[in-house]
Image (cartoon, coloured by chain):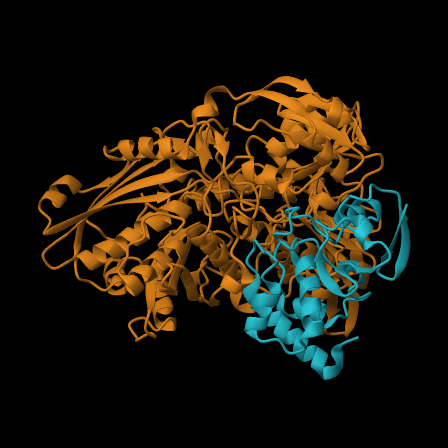
Chain colours: A cyan, B orange
Amino acid sequence: MITLKVNGKQFQAEVDPATPLLWVLRETLGLTGTKYGCGMAQCGACTVHLDGEAIRSCVKRVSDAAGKEITTIEGLSPDLSHPLQKAWIEIDVPQCGYCQSGQLMSAAVLLAENPKPTDTDIDEGMAGNICRCGTYPRIRQAIHRAAEIKSQGGAK
Amino acid sequence: MSATTVKRRDFLKTGAAVGGGLLISLYLPELSQAGVSAKTSDKLKFVEPATFAPNAFIRIATDDTVTVIVNKSEMGQGVYTSLPMLIAEELEADWSKIKVESAPVDAVYNHTVFGMQLTGGSTSTASEWQRFRKAGATARIMLIAAAAQNWKVEPQSLRAENGFVIHPASKRRASFGSLADTAATLTPPKDVPLKDPKDFKLIGKSTRRLDTPAKVNGSAQFGLDVQIPGMMTAVVARPPVFGGKVVSLNAEKAKAVAGVKDVLQVPSGVAVIATGFWPAKLGRERLEIKWDDGPGANLSTVGMREQYATLAKNPGLVANKVGDPAKALAGAAKTITAEYEVPYLAHAMMEPLNCVVDLRADRCEIWTGTQMQTVDRMAAAAAAGLKPEQVQIHTTLLGGGFGRRANPASDFVLEAVQVAKAARVPVKVVWTREDDIRGGYYRPMWYDRMVGGVDATGNPVAWTHTIVGQSIFQGTFFEQFGIKDGIDSASVEGAADLLYGIPNLQVDLHTPRIGVPVLWWRSVGHSHNGFAVEAFFDELAHAGGKDPYELRRTLLAKQPRMRAVLDLVAQKANWGKPLPAGRGRGIATHFSFDSYVGQVAEVSVDKTGAVRVHRMVCAVDCGQVVNPDSVKAQMEGGIIFGLTAALKDEITFEGGRVQQRNFHDYPMLRINESPEIEVYIVPSTENPTGVGEPGVPPVAPAVANAIFAATGKRVRKLPIRLS
């Protein structure tokens, strides 16, 4: 039995400890906002926060996440109020939307660590997340916009 | 899917014939007392009594919500917003009350031209442009009639505005929802007038997508997210060589994996049924299967390339001939010959293929992200031993499509039904990324031989283009539309219908039969012909000492729309103005899916041969624009998609096996490689045309031409490798 703390709530999961965190989140806990894209930390669709760091949950053993604070896209904000969510909606970033949970979770850590990122900072911070629809120009724009919203006190 | 099978003129003609039939059936009074046709009513159980459903596309509830039932799959292109905009415009709805539902499978939702339910060929807006607006106008007229009846006034004295019917004389107002009950008792009008475009309030205005909120908080439901009671997860071991078969199977070790419930042979391979994805995948890794590779075992990219190059030396079946190109070439002041090549490509949608099937004795329910519901339902019914009406498909959001989810062979749906049938439990079949990259249904590999001649003044006088590659339509039921006299229209689209006024021209085709499954891939034949034609055009311009932009301008004299696009993109990209040292500009235009696109790339190449695309400028004329921001987004996305193909990827074979397997060796363009992109839309009141695909074809040639401008090196093969 593994105890997981996800989005502030405790869960008990009876799973093989070697199972990647991704599949426990999606299938055991029903938190399907975190996506499977490659299974080898290449695309970033499965990005979640582990003690505030962006990690690829498709290659993280669930046992290594036990006892740590896990945040998934469902826990980014309860009501679309995160500056990134606001900016994403304002700029209409998503197309198919499948990679966007991962994009947002990577961007959230980037923004937390660097409140006013440059284009280069964004390129470096977001290079691990693939978007096949090609929303990159809008992701850049939306991260700048989120930084602005945050600096104006729009942050939680 | 190719839209060139249905040319503009035919589109209108066929649209009237096929679409007209649908429109009639849609507006026949007996279809709409209860709001929906008799055929659909048993499936549309969600229609509640206190709901006004004037046709199969609209439901207005007493709480004022307007639900638009969208018959096109949302795969990122924005149809769940742009199509509701068409209805809301004519309905005079309150946009904030609009909700969207995906349509069930029913003939009433068929494509107005293709006669089946499908999303493809960049045709969604074009095919629904009339029907959705008429659906909205019908509902508006009925709501007005309901208010007129309630208030005992003439309908002419009323108007609809922002979700209300208003009687200006008495200042009375009634919300659409409050009129739903009365409106539901009325007979819909037979014919309805549509708005004059000058009165559009929504159409043509950038409108935020309705699906964005759900896509930024994790609540959007893709096929892979579907969970149903009692469901098992399956992964399938498919043959490593296309056409291979299982010779022997030892499933002992796989069955020993905790969570693995069963191992079953299915027509496509061996399915591992488990409590979740992870045990299923672990189980598959432990399968011991001996495969018979079959005749595909000798397939190699090197061998195919030799075969194609040999074929290209001689003309194939003639797809188009103008004048006397042989004579013109013989008399030309200068001729050039070049061979162009592009590889097989996988679609690599971010959401790998998947399909949930709940198969019972008398019915089958399917949840999947598909672009081709009618065909999938027929395949599912045949596999399940049911009638098509006993199969229902719930179309989820698609995590990308690009054509892969519109397969005439219904591979991922058919297989899932076969697995469910064998497993006797509800199953979700999940493809891993490796399964996706190695699963076939690729954009075909192509080899093009081009010969061009210019006269003494440098003007092109002759152009021949020999195309070699597999047919997409061959062997599918689309053959009847797509293949004529041995010519697959998707093989020659964007080449045989050249817009340039070149007096002597021949485009011909060889169609080798190769055992690699192929399929349409965002922009289909245009994806390779756009490259070969526009890059070779650049070569011919330089051979004649002409500026590539100016020469295009001259030869597009009879193509005012393309010429306007060309001029706009050249102007916005500062064509002809100096650039920083080491940079080059390349220009390309392409007509596809009835839309006109021009692009200018700005690139540099470093000492290692690495190509950096700094800026892409794009101009598009796609007729009347519904949601300008969505058009921009599709051009941006098409450019990134095109850059990935230009700079990164190839699917290659050795010993019949695909040599790539995941994003590390089939990479995607990333944000740090992504250029600045500018998109300009040419204002137009012509009928709307394609948007999802036309942004792709000009990308590779614009980049290749820019590399020549920057370095003097010609790029004739994709992906671009300069080192």
Q: Residue furthest bottom?
A: A152
Please state which of residues B672 and B152 is positioned toward the viewer in this rendering: B672
Q: Give how far across and how far down residue B134 sits, in percent.
A: 61, 53
Q: Give how far across and how far down residue B55 sits, in percent.
A: 69, 47
Q: Give how far across and how far down residue B198 sits, in percent.
A: 52, 68
**Residue at 76% across, 76% down:** A155
Q: Is residue B601 left or right of residue A154?
A: left
- Report the quarter where the C terminus of chain B lies: bottom left
Q: Give how far across and how far down residue B671 sits, in percent.
A: 55, 62
- Compared to residue B29, the image places residue B460 above or below, namely below
Q: How many marks?
A: 0
**Residue at 51% across, 48% down:** B123
Picture quadrant where residue B382 is located: top right
Please state which of residues B229 and B232 is positioned toward the viewer in this rendering: B232
Picture quadrant where residue A6 is located: bottom right
**Residue at 77% across, 48% down:** A61
Q: Is residue A19 left or right of residue B539?
A: right
Residue B560 makes an appearance in the image: no
Q: Residue furthest top?
A: B247
Residue B31 makes an appearance in the image: yes
- Compared to residue B448, the image places residue B293 above or below, namely above
- Compared to residue B597, the image places residue B370 above or below, namely above
- Compared to residue B269, the image places residue B205 above or below, namely below
